[in-house]
Amino acid sequence: MKTALKSVVLVIVTTSLSLAKDETPKTKTETVKPQTLSRGWGDNLDWVQTYEEALFKAKSGNKPLIVINHREDCPHSQALKKAFAEHKGIQKLADRFVLLNVIYDPTDKNLALDGQYVPKIVFVDPSLVVRADIPGKYSNHRYTYEPEDIDLLFENMKKAQTLLKTEL
């Protein structure tokens, strides 16, 4: 009987210990930021979710639209995203635009321009005209930018603002 009682107590203690909650504080906590519409292109900026919403806001707000087509698994897109997010001038000027970044190929054929590739940045004015006259510097992919082209992108954003004031 003593042996059986010892066995029962041992089973209860073992079970209690295995079910006990670990109350020791974790030394390393991993924080995961929630996914936002910015996808890292500028978390403090106001981004829209869809192309249709972007077109509506551009027209109704009389603001140019920037469409950034990129991929999460593309090293060129990731490098450009980092440069875009870190450029103080771009982040400040971006408030004057409707902003959309997409990780899929838009269905609007007007955005295809010279083909489908990433990263690709296209400007659309408030009259909903795709501005093919605001390209990057490359002849084979006219609307792509590399991180070292970030100042050209900034100048093109200023150009889109200037065209807005002079043409519309």
Image (cartoon, grey):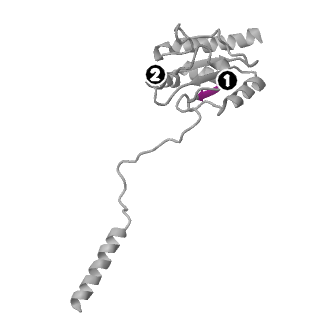
Horizontal arrangement in the rendering, residue 52 relative to residue 153 (left or right): right
Q: Residues within 10 Å of mark 2 (few under 14, many from 20)?
A: some
Q: Quadrant of the N terminus?
A: bottom left
Give coordinates of residue 40: x percent, y percent: 52, 31
State yes or no: residue 97 in magenta. yes
The residue drawn where x is 68% and y is 16% is 130
- Looking at the rendering, which quadrant does residue 13 occupy? bottom left
Label annotation for residue 108: 1
State yes or no: residue 117 in magenta. no
Q: Is residue 132 above or below residue 7?
A: above
The residue drawn where x is 62% and y is 26% is 106
User: Between tags 2 and 1, which lies in front?
Assistant: 1
- Looking at the rendering, which quadrant does residue 124 occupy? top right
Give coordinates of residue 43: x percent, y percent: 56, 32
What's the magenta region?
95-101
The residue drawn where x is 38% and y is 65% is 21
Question: Quick one: SS at disc 2?
Answer: helix
Q: Residues within 10 Å of mark 1 (few under 14, many from 20)?
A: few
Q: Which amino acid is tagged 1? A: Asp
The residue drawn where x is 45% and y is 23% is 79
Label annotation for residue 76: 2
- Closer to the chain start, of discs 2 and 1, is 2
Q: Which amino acid is tagged 2? A: His
Question: Quick one: SS at disc 1?
Answer: loop
